[in-house]
Amino acid sequence: MAATPVAGRPAWAIAPDRLATVSGGPAAEPALQSVVREDVRLTASDGVGLAGEVYRPERPGAHPLLVVPGAWMSLATHEVTSARRLRALAAAGYVVVTYDPRGFRRSGGSVDMAGPKDVDDVSRVIDWALAHEGADPARIGLLSESYGAAVSLNAAAFDARVRAVAALSGWTDLVAAQWRNGTSVGTVKLFQELVGRLNGRFDERLTAVLADPGRGSPGSLAWARQRSPRTHVARLNRHKPAVLLVNEWDDALIPAGQTGEFLDALEGPKQLHMRPGGHGDSVNPTLGFLGGASLWERAVAWVDRYVAGTGDGPTGPAVVLRPRTPGPLEHYPGWAALRRADRRVPLTPVRLGDTAPLIAGLPSAAESGPFPAAGALDALGVHQPTVLPLLAPPAAAVWTSAPLSAPHALRGAPQVGGSLTADAEHGTLVIHLYDTDPLGQARLLTHAPYSFRNHPARRPLHFTVPLPATAWDLPAGHRIAVVLDTVDHRYASAGTTGSRLAIDTGAIRLTAPLTPLTGLPPR
């Protein structure tokens, strides 16, 4: 059954300029107000000092409260943009308290990675704001980006006073973000650690987790699950805060799809926006306009409605996405609606033979794109290319579909399965999915690693690898290509360089959420 977008577009999605940061605002506030800003020093329950800032309307009153935990990285340009946005929120009638999470920048302690201490810190900040800023205890919300978004989701699960959360580019499953299909995201974790150490202080536990290779030790996995909002869904559903989620298709830190699965598990008011680009690009004031208006305005409209209590702001369908190829916004009743288009796509190996030989560690022309720049390039419409004739054993193996007889929409998470035999007990495959034109020029749709360990050498191994979700329109005459190789700069390989893998050419299968564009309602 084909996934069907909800017909039409809600009014709030048609005119983004009507949702400017300072438009509307809390219903009880008649006009924009003068803003008072001050630095504050708060004390966590364990005595750690938290450095923050307060933006509040000059006119006294029981104003709605927004708590804004800071991000992992803070550049000068980010600070300027953030200050402007928070001042606008205060001018619209909010008391805004933003702070550096523990372990970062001016705050004390060590990084807790959205763990129990971070969760308790949010509640302490709320307590302080109610006691010292005269904020309205019945109108409390959390709004943050990246690291602060994960902190906010976890905090909302444990503090029933929170009426709404706007979580922009935050993880919902830290396990899947750090270890993918038995593979450590080595380059991504290294980048994350380097930036984190420039901005903050790590304890021995976090250092050990970031260094944990492969599929992660039981202790590291339990640590990461505790810091995953999906673990706390039952708590969120007890008091049902309104949750707005924003993520990007080519986010190297957060595989596309995990936030959609989290969204479907929520029972309160909810909405997910997916946009082209990399981590945080959809709220980046420079790149955000390339995927439509910056989604910061959507976040402000969300808290206006569910925290301040105005009648305006987003309601509508649960999922609003913009494809990575040119096209209008699409609306779906939930993330699961995208999976209803799943179908088997027949594949043919490009080179004949029972097996395709690969040599571990031999690079090929199939690559995930230059991290961390690939996401921004995706937002600009520059998609990682390759040329299929350059891909051949022993560096890579290729399978293609038949040419598409009509344009098709790929919406959601594909899956690739197959069988291999290796001469070593450990190894890594990298699976790439491409849109390929009749001349063999290809653009990357999605990719994922798969690693095996302690599997007896020369014994067949069957694998099934879910790929991150994507949204892409394929023209008629194009083919879908599956490319397997053994190395990608983003992932830490489990294999020994020079070991050999034999891929069963007849066993490779692709399941993809693929729908003829002619079969969809007008968008």
Image (spheres, rainbow, N blue to C red):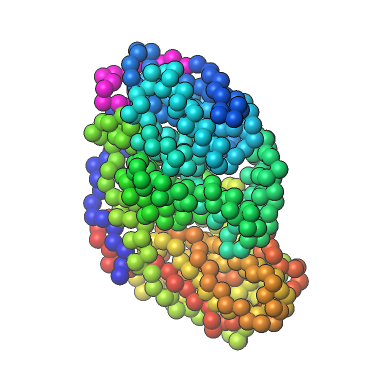
Q: Which residues are magenta?
A: 25-37
Question: Is residue 47 depicted above or below 156 in this figure?
Answer: above
Q: Residue furthest front?
A: 46
Residue 227 among magenta residues: no
Whole-percent x, y for residue 333 in the image = 29, 55
Tell me if residue 431 comes above or below residue 377 in the rendering.
below
Question: Who's the residue at 29% across and 58% down the image?
Answer: 5
Q: Is residue 258 visible?
A: yes
Seen from the viewer's position, the closer of residues 89 and 402 is: 89
Seen from the viewer's position, the closer of residues 416 and 259 is: 259
**Residue depicted at 26% across the width and 22% down the height:** 28
**Residue 2 locus on image (x, y percent):** 31, 67
Residue 36 in the magenta stretch? The answer is: yes
Residue at image location 30% in from the left, 53% down from the top = 331
Quick check: 55 left or right of 515? right
- 197 sits to left or right of 28: right
Residue 328 position, x and y percent, is 33, 51
Q: Who's the residue at 38% across and 22% down the image?
A: 135
Image spot of residue 196 (x, y percent): 64, 39
What type of secondary structure mainly makes up the magenta span? loop
Quadrant of the rendering where the N terminus is positioned: bottom left
**Quick check: 462 left or right of 28?**
right
State the quadrant of the C terminus: bottom left
